[in-house]
Amino acid sequence: MDLPLENIVQTPSWKQILLDMVHTQKINPWDVDIVGIADGFFERVKEMKKMNFYIPANIILACAILLKYKSEALLQKEEEEVLPEEEDLRIPFSQIEEIKPIRRIPPKRHITLKELMEEMEMVISYQPKKTKKPKRIEINLEISGFDLEDEVTKIWKVLEKEKDVEGWVLFSRITKGEPNERIVETLFTLLHMEQKQNINMKQDRFFEEIFIKMVKFNG
């Protein structure tokens, strides 16, 4: 398997890996198979891990998105295959409910490279809409020897050091080797930072990886 060694050393982005795959595997950019590209991307991530390369958070997040696209594309294919070939699927107009537009994720099994990258960019760059803040409930939580504001400054410096080219950091990376008490303190600090809109956090499933996106440090 070809690996862009020079790019890996320079901390690549998920886009670089996708473009490199299209080039080295001679993938038609006008007809990209989501299942194939997801499998290929996943294999590259496994190869990077096996060779002990540092894997940036944006690449792991992109891999998770592609694998989700793959599962939905396969499910869509199965649903299409079980439809009777000659059944009359016409529905009386009066029985058709209002159709509400939704964004396509994934768009379809085969799409263009441009469409795929635009869809992924929308997910990876997602910023939650600002909503009216609910009434705050004060909870007095004291941890011995723990200064929250001081911890915010320390954690921000760690994030600055560990962030990838798109500002993403893995929670597991900044807490690796730390005792459980320190991991809890770090998570508590990050939740406080998200409330202050210093960062955004993503987690697809409970107990799985937490992705941290740096926004702006405002003290």
Image (spheres, rainbow, N blue to C red):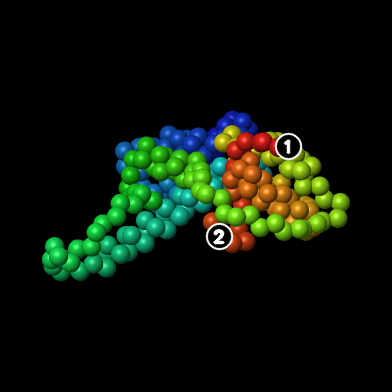
Q: Please tell me which residue lies in front, 79 or 23.
A: 79
Q: Position of residue 196 (x, y in %)?
A: 64, 44
Residue drawn at x 49%, y 45% is 129
Q: Does residue 123 appear to the left or right of 78 in the view shown?
A: right
Q: Please tell me which residue lies in front, 156 or 3.
A: 156
Q: Amino acid at mark 2?
A: Arg
Q: Residues within 10 Å of mark 2 (few under 14, many from 20)?
A: few
Q: Please tell me which residue lies in front, 115 or 218.
A: 218
Image mark for residue 9: none
Residue drawn at x 76%, y 43% is 149
Image mark for residue 205: 2
Residue drawn at x 67%, y 36% is 218
- Label 2 or label 1, whichever lies nearer to me, is 1
Based on the displayed image, in which of its 4 quarters is residue 85 positioned? bottom left
* Quarter in which the C terminus is drawn: top right
Q: Is residue 4 above or below residue 202?
A: above
Based on the displayed image, in which of its 4 quarters is residue 160 positioned? top right
Q: Amino acid at mark 1?
A: Lys
